[in-house]
Image (cartoon, rainbow, N blue to C red):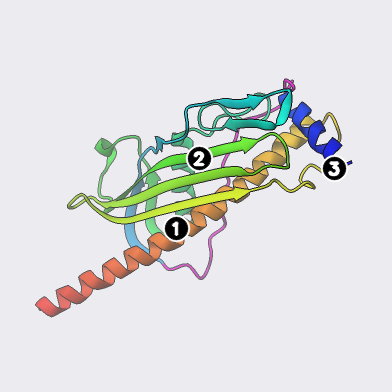
């Protein structure tokens, strides 16, 4: 029965999504009252595409081998492409929503910088989703923070997730409720992205807080 459910999902995932809203919209985490607040302004620049060169890999006749690169193409009728720009905007939105920083915004170019002390640069290294519920999906980001005053890299972080979509995620959707299934997949990917961003954000906050303390201490010694 479980195997049949997996194959059914594989078939439905490949069917044209008539009337399905497949546009992916990232939904940030709610602010955490315990997060440290840093009086810094940060700009997030567009990420680079570091994924492998494929849009869809494997055979449609063998769903166990079928994998989609969401950066380069998404899944027709289910989810639009998660481009590097979308990842960068999502990370900027997540950091801004966290309340952990004075201000965070996404910019398309360094020429748009105003008074931000740091920029976040990055690359999407993996954004792979499988059709079946039996195999691992893989997301991975490489991130770094650069101090605008001297162009020095002050923080680097790799965040990654490999996970299987829970077999119950589509419960209640029925066999032809493609919008329901698309919405559930979007929610699952949102969950994983929020986890990755929270890990990166916590590490960035700790690094910038330590950097600020060192600067304050040195200023005190000079006085």
Q: Secondary structure at mark 2?
A: strand
Check disc 3: other Cα within 10 Å, few if <14, some if 14-19, many if 20+. Answer: few
Residue 122 visible within the image: yes
Residue 117, percent from left and from top: 26, 54
Q: Which residue corresponds to the image point at 72% horizontal and 37% vertical from the top-left? A: 132
Drawn side of residue 148 relative to residue 68, left or right: left
Quadrant, the N terminus: top right
Residue stretch rendered in magenta on the structure = 15-36
The residue at which mark 2 appears reads as 126
Relative to 26, residue 175 above or below: above
> Which comes before the other along the chain, label 1 or label 2?
2
Relative to 212, residue 11 above or below: above
Q: Is residue 21 magenta?
A: yes
Q: Is residue 154 magenta?
A: no
Q: Nearer the viewer, mark 1 or mark 2?
A: 2
Compute the Cα span from label 1 to label 2. Answer: 19 Å
Q: Secondary structure at mark 3?
A: helix
Q: Nearer the viewer, mark 3 or mark 1?
A: 3
Compute the Cα span from label 3 to label 2. Answer: 28 Å
The residue at which mark 1 appears reads as 201
């Amino acid at each position: 029965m479980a195997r049949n459910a997996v194959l059914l999902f594989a078939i439905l995932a490949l069917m044209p999504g008539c009337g399905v809203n497949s546009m992916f919209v990232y939904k940030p985490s709610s602010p955490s009252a315990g997060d440290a607040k840093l009086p810094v302004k940060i700009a997030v620049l567009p990420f680079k595409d570091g994924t492998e060169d494929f849009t869809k890999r494997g055979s449609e006749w063998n769903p166990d081998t079928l994998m989609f690169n969401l950066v380069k193409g998404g899944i027709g009728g289910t989810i639009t492409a998660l481009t590097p720009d979308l990842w960068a905007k999502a990370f900027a939105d997540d950091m801004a929503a966290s309340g952990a920083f004075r201000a965070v915004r996404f910019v398309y170019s360094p020429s748009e910088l105003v008074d931000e002390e740091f920029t976040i640069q990055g690359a999407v290294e993996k954004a792979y989703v499988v059709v079946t519920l039996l195999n691992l999906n893989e997301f991975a980001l490489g991130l770094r923070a650069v101090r605008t005053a001297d162009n020095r890299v002050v923080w680097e972080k790799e965040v990654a997730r490999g996970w299987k979509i829970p077999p119950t995620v589509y419960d209640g959707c029925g066999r032809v409720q493609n919008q329901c299934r698309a919405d559930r997949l979007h929610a699952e990917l949102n969950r994983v992205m929020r986890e990755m961003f929270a890990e990166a954000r916590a590490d960035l906050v700790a690094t910038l807080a330590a950097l600020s303390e060192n600067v304050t201490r040195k200023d005190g010694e000079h006085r």
